[in-house]
Image (tube, helix red, strand yellow):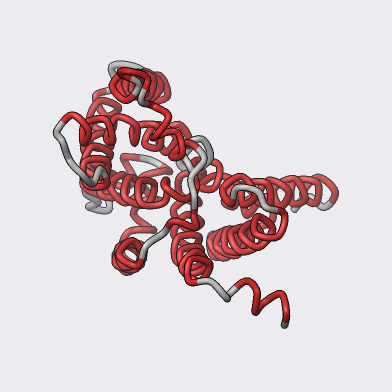
């Protein structure tokens, strides 16, 4: 009880745990479809685009750069989807080009006059800085994702199998893909201040990849991904508090350990 009392003695720790319990399931469930559809590059590019979003906010003189960052990420996601559907180049090539370009532009703007130091914290994040307002944003997004998942998870699965199959079932492919991309953009940008640009993609991919090593069907896949994501978030946050390290890296380290354990289990007991 002493450890629990110490953990929940501070309001910032209570808010941090609440953020983990809301954001981790979102990252876990969305991560399953990111892994299934081979979109790791996509989510990574969205994370890096946050720098450009912040830079746009700075140029516009915005005191709060959250809104420009979110808006830029949403526009960036739409743009990536539109160009990828044009099939002028391989999807991963298009994403890599845009991610590199947006990151460079963001860094160039934010580093003017040697002022990047005050933005460097976003690279590794700080979950202890989460505010009540941001928790409300996460709760609203949680509700939206649940509704989307209930109505669209089978549609996304059908699109992943074949565009022709999806069209034969009357699925509006572009609409579903764009909506999914927007949800990824929102959860990435809302979580990035706590997890960090360098690590946010890992927390999207690792729990889902670990779940894939164990699951035999889609229901197990989603359940394991959420379980691993929540456990990684809680264990990493607790470890970061008592070991005195950054929470983002601690969470990702726990998720990495889970992945390697499930990978070894899969090798030992293949399904």
Q: Is residue 18 above or below residue 69?
A: below
Query: Would you say residue 237 is visible in this rendering?
Result: yes
- Residue situated in front as seen by the camera: 33 or 75: 75
Dividing the picture into quarters, in which one does residue 54 lie?
A: top left
The residue lying at 62 percent from left, 71 percent from top is: 7
- Tell me: 39 left or right of 6: left
Residue 167 found in image quarter: top left
Residue 18 lies, with reference to residue 257, above or below; the image says below
Q: Is residue 217 above or below residue 199?
A: below
Residue 166 screen position, x and y as percent:
31, 47
Q: Residue furthest bottom?
A: 1
Q: Residue placed farthest to the right in the image?
A: 268
Left or right of 182, for residue 12: right
Nearest the eye: 123 or 220: 123
Where residue 83 sits in the image (x, y, percent)? 25, 25
Asked if residue 39 shows in the view, the reply is no
Q: Residue at x 30, y 18 (%)?
A: 112
166 over 231 or under it: above or below: above
Which residue reaches farthest left?
A: 60
Front residue of 256/145: it is 256
Left or right of 203 on screen, residue 141: left
Horizontal side of residue 236 vs 40, given as left or right: right
The image shows residue 196 at horizontal and vertical percentages of 48, 42
31 or 105, which lies in front?
105
Q: Residue at x 23, y 46 (%)?
A: 64
| Number of disc labels | 0
The quarter of the image holding the N terminus is bottom right
């Amino acid at each position: 009880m002493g450890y629990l009392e110490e953990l929940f003695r501070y309001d910032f720790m209570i808010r941090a745990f609440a953020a983990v319990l809301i954001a981790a399931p979102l990252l876990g469930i969305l991560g399953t479809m990111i892994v299934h559809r081979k979109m790791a590059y996509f989510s990574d590019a969205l994370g890096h685009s946050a720098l450009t979003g912040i830079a746009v906010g700075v140029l516009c003189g915005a005191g709060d750069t959250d809104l420009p960052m979110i808006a830029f990420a949403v526009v960036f996601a739409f743009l990536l989807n539109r160009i990828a559907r044009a099939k002028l180049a391989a999807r991963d090539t298009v994403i890599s080009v845009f991610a590199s370009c947006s990151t460079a532009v963001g860094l160039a703007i934010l580093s003017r006059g040697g002022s990047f130091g005050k933005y460097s914290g976003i690279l590794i994040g700080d979950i202890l800085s989460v505010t009540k307002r941001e928790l409300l944003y996460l709760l609203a997004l949680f509700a939206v994702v649940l509704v989307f998942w209930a109505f669209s998870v089978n549609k996304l699965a059908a699109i992943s199998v074949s565009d022709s199959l999806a069209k034969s079932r009357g699925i509006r492919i572009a609409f579903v893909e764009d909506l999914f991309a927007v949800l990824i953009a929102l959860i990435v940008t809302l979580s990035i201040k706590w997890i960090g640009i360098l690590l946010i993609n890992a927390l999207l991919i690792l729990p889902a990849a670990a779940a894939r090593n164990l699951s035999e069907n889609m229901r197990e896949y989603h359940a394991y991904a959420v379980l691993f994501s929540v456990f990684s978030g809680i264990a990493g946050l607790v470890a970061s508090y008592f070991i005195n390290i950054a929470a983002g890296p601690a969470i990702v380290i726990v998720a990495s350990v889970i992945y390697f354990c499930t990978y070894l289990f899969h090798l030992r007991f293949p399904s």
